[in-house]
Amino acid sequence: MNERARQKLILALDFPSIDPALKLAQCISSTVGIFKINIHLFTSAGPSAVEKLHQLGPDIFLDLKFHDIPNTVKGAVSSAIALPGLRLLDVHALGGLEMMRAAAAARDEAKNANLALPKLLAITILTSMDTAAMRGVGIVGPASKRVVQLARLAQKAGMDGVVASPQEVRAIRRACGKDFLIVVPGIRPSVGGGPAGGRKRKTDDQARVATPAEAIRAGADYLVIGRPITGAPDPMAAAGAILEEISSALP
Ligand code: C5P
């Protein structure tokens, strides 16, 4: 197995409770680099989910997408940093410069406490949103422009990187440089990719999508993949095929 490809694969364990998440995680832990825990699983299973999944080996992306007043976000980030094995943690860039600065301040204060620090990511615009959905919440203009604007703001606030759609990776890289992390959901393999497998690409509720190879060639640091693996008839085989596709696209 290509270790570089494995380290780029984040499996979104989007399950309603810890048992099915652990069941899949145990079978697949040697194939993926990071397990992602979302608000659904965290709300039902709590912080112990982080510990149980981290014990299997991979680090954790705690995808709770904090979006609140700066002081509240700062407190939430401080509490999250104390959890074991956190490699990535995120907040919404739309919370604004001061909110992201408060998150960065919590991370920086933890440096002094000698804790292993996660990288802080800012969600730009959800990959499920198309132009009409963006217009509905008052975000006008092409997604790529707004996303780059939010990525610049995140960098200014001291975030380590962003979450964005594969279609915006090149523009963010140009704007924010080679060391700024770009984490990319909205990945759909060119064939299959859904619970039924099949030949036709399935996008579910994602709007701004690309294949694993396209996202890697564009310069993504990590790919977040959920249903194309968790909903596949054979999740191990689906993950293996995705790893091969990532390997083939690596420089
Ligand atoms: O199943 P799928 O591959 O679409 O899962 C994508 C995962 O990435 C989900 O857990 C979703 O919450 C998360 N995500 C996203 N778009 C963002 C940020 C996170 O789809 N902008």
Image (cartoon, rainbow, N blue to C red):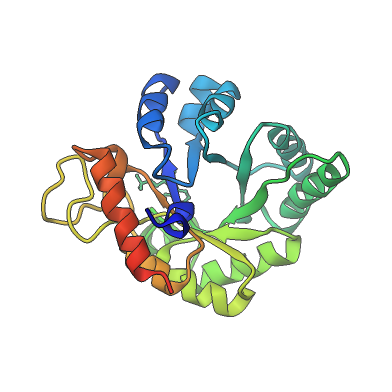
Name the foreground residue: 200 vs 250: 250
Quarter of the image that includes the C terminus: bottom left
- Which residue sits furthest front? 1
- Which residue sits furthest right? 112
The spot of residue 78 in percent (x, y) is 76, 37
Q: Which residue sits at x=44%, y=22%? A: 18
Q: Which residue sits at x=47%, y=71%? A: 219
In this picture, residue 250 sits left or right of residue 157: left
Whether residue 208 is visible, yes or no, is no
Q: Which residue sits at x=76%, y=45%? A: 70
In this picture, residue 177 sits left or right of residue 58: right
Name the foreground residue: 157 vs 197: 197
Q: Which residue sits at x=63%, y=40%? A: 86
- How many numbered markers are drawn? 0
- Which residue sits furthest left? 199
In the displayed structure, 20 sits above or below 170; it is above
User: Within the image, what quadrant is residue 32 found in?
Assistant: top left
Name the foreground residue: 147 vs 158: 158
The spot of residue 177 in percent (x, y) is 63, 76
The spot of residue 186 in percent (x, y) is 37, 55
In the displayed structure, 244 sits above or below 228; it is below
Whether residue 70 is visible, yes or no, is yes
